Amino acid sequence: MIAPEAQAPRLTVLCMKWGTKYGPEYVNRLYAMVSRHLTERRCRFLCLTDETTGLRPEVDTAPIPSLPPVPPRERGWRKLAAFSPEAAERLCETVLYLDLDVVVMGSLDPFLEHPGVFPMIRDWYHPFRVVGNSSVFRFRPAEQAELFDCFRRNADDIARRFRNEQEFVTDYLRRRGELSFWPPDWAPSYRVGCLPLWPLRVWRSPQPPSGARVIVFHGAPKPPEAIAGRRGVFQTFRPAPWIADHWRE
């Protein structure tokens, strides 16, 4: 995945890992899935992280840039560090960002070829509102320096007006006319697009939608729980062993 020295990389595949929620296996498996599904070899795989222990040597790492303080009640702002000047120094001309808990099961090349300044996922829970999900997005650091500056100048006000970073980013891009979305079948939600509706999930196995390239695991379950399945009063769902075919090194 790391580009030869004679050829400067032009793409960064970026992820972020902080705290103890995700172990190093999430980064290592994401690296492996990207390697299997991306033909662009002039690429750097970079993880912004506060802990490098256990990461495979092919993964480039850098500290997570700091953010302005926000009100304690707010959450979900850490990802904005990807747009900071400190991050920009490590990023190539194009960046494809992937959350750690996604499962890549199809070619990523179309995510690089798709038109648009800043394509991202359209959130599955807001069919009548324009809200993006930032589990998979693409941007050029040179074009989005102002996004971070806007947050830095107005962090307190922004954190009071928006629930999390993806709502702020959606609004910011929409006002600039730069917001676009991937085709809906490219990056479906596991909970919305793969799990059958209740109570069908009790006896019907989860299946990936046709055309899915990246399965997004927001909230619960995460890939290990989805592979194993679960039995409970309101949380019953059957195992999805097909996830293990992709979520591996």
Image: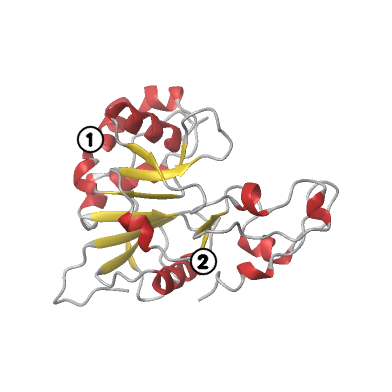
Label ID, residue 86 = none
Q: Nearer the viewer, residue 161 or 241?
A: 241
> In percent of the image, x 69 and y 65: which residue is there?
240
> Given this view, does label 2 or label 1 mark the residue nearer the observer?
2
Residue 68 lies, with reference to residue 44, above or below; the image says above
Labelled pair 2, 1 in contact (Cβ < 8 Å)? no
* Residue 155 seen: yes
Q: Amino acid at mark 1?
A: Glu
> In percent of the image, x 47 and y 33: which residue is there?
131
Characterize the local packing of mark 2: few (<14), some (14-19) or many (20 or more) Cα atoms within 10 angstroms: many
Q: How is the image coloured?
A: secondary structure
* Count of numbered labels shown in the rendering: 2
Residue 199 lies, with reference to residue 246, above or below; the image says above
Name the image quarter holding residue 13: bottom left
Name the image quarter holding residue 215: bottom right
Q: Which residue is mark 1?
A: 146
Residue 150 lies, with reference to residue 231, above or below; the image says above
Q: Which residue is mark 2?
A: 105
Residue 53 lies, with reference to residue 195, above or below; the image says below
